[in-house]
Amino acid sequence: MSINYVALGDSTAVGVGASRGGGYPERLASRLRNDGLPVGLTNLGQSGARIRDVFTGQVKRAVATQPTLVTLGVGTNDLWRGTAVEDFQEELDRIARRLKQTGAPLVVVNLADMALAPVAKLVPSALYEGRIEPFNAAMAEVARAHGLHLVDLYSASKEMIPHNPHFFCHDGFHPSEQGYEEWADLLLPTVRTLVGR
């Protein structure tokens, strides 16, 4: 049975920052193919997308493709652009409810610790100080409520970023090719379990 994988999210799904190979969805799909699984990927990610954009512009199309696996990586743009955490949680809840109807497992990636990103030194700390954790707590709450599969990029990034000086691309904000590779590796065990069912 082939896997109909749909990726939702922002520039990290698109792969902004990598010179080749796309974002984490492409890399995840190729890892699954290396496992011998037939995977078709529909990547609906859009650069700059916030949670509202995912709900209005991506979810309907995702449902129409009849996915058997969905990943969602969103929130960084909401963080930088001042979306209220309550609004974020409400939108995520709507997305989860809508996608639940497809019967496909939904894997949600929380926010990396952007305080460790080079760009953090260039922007007011009020943009991210003490704001990342509430966003991640909101994701965890929605995940628990709807049985979503949460991958903890936040904790992992505290290891990844300091140990890999090339985790980010030249803009100091988007992951590099190496960063996306680590991201895909992090998702793989969860996704493997889900598609192996």
Image (tube, rainbow, N blue to C red):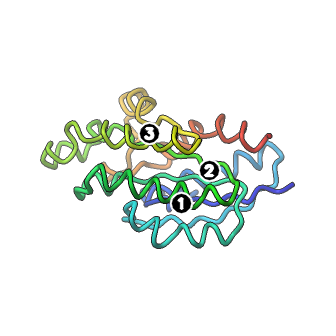
**Front-lying residue, 91 or 108:** 91
- What kind of element bears circle 1? strand
- Whole-percent x, y for residue 58 in the image: 52, 69
Identify which amino acid the numbered label 3 is placed on. Answer: Glu
Which of the two discs, 2 and 1, sits closer to the camera? 1
Which of the two discs, 2 and 3, sits closer to the camera? 3
- Whole-percent x, y for residue 170 in the image: 33, 52
Q: Residue 106 vs residue 166: left or right? A: right
Mark 2 vs mark 1: which is more N-terminal? 1
Question: Which residue is the site of mark 1?
Answer: 8
Query: Residue 27, labelled with which disc?
Result: 2
**Front-lying residue, 159 or 154:** 154
Question: Which residue is the site of mark 3?
Answer: 141
Residue sitting at 38 percent across and 34 percent down? Answer: 161
**Front-lying residue, 97 or 8:** 97
- Whole-percent x, y for residue 104 in the image: 69, 53
* Vertical relation: 181 (above or below) 8: above
**Front-lying residue, 138 or 77:** 138
* Vertical relation: 107 (above or below) 17: above
Residue sitting at 80 percent across and 40 percent down? Answer: 197
Which of the two discs, 1 and 3, sits closer to the camera? 3
Mark 2 touching mark 3, by CB under 8 A? no
Query: How dense is the environment of label 3, judged by Cα within 10 Å: few (below 14), some, or many (20 and up)?
Result: some
Separation of residues labelled 2 and 1 (CA atoms): 15 Å
Identify which amino acid the numbered label 1 is placed on. Answer: Leu
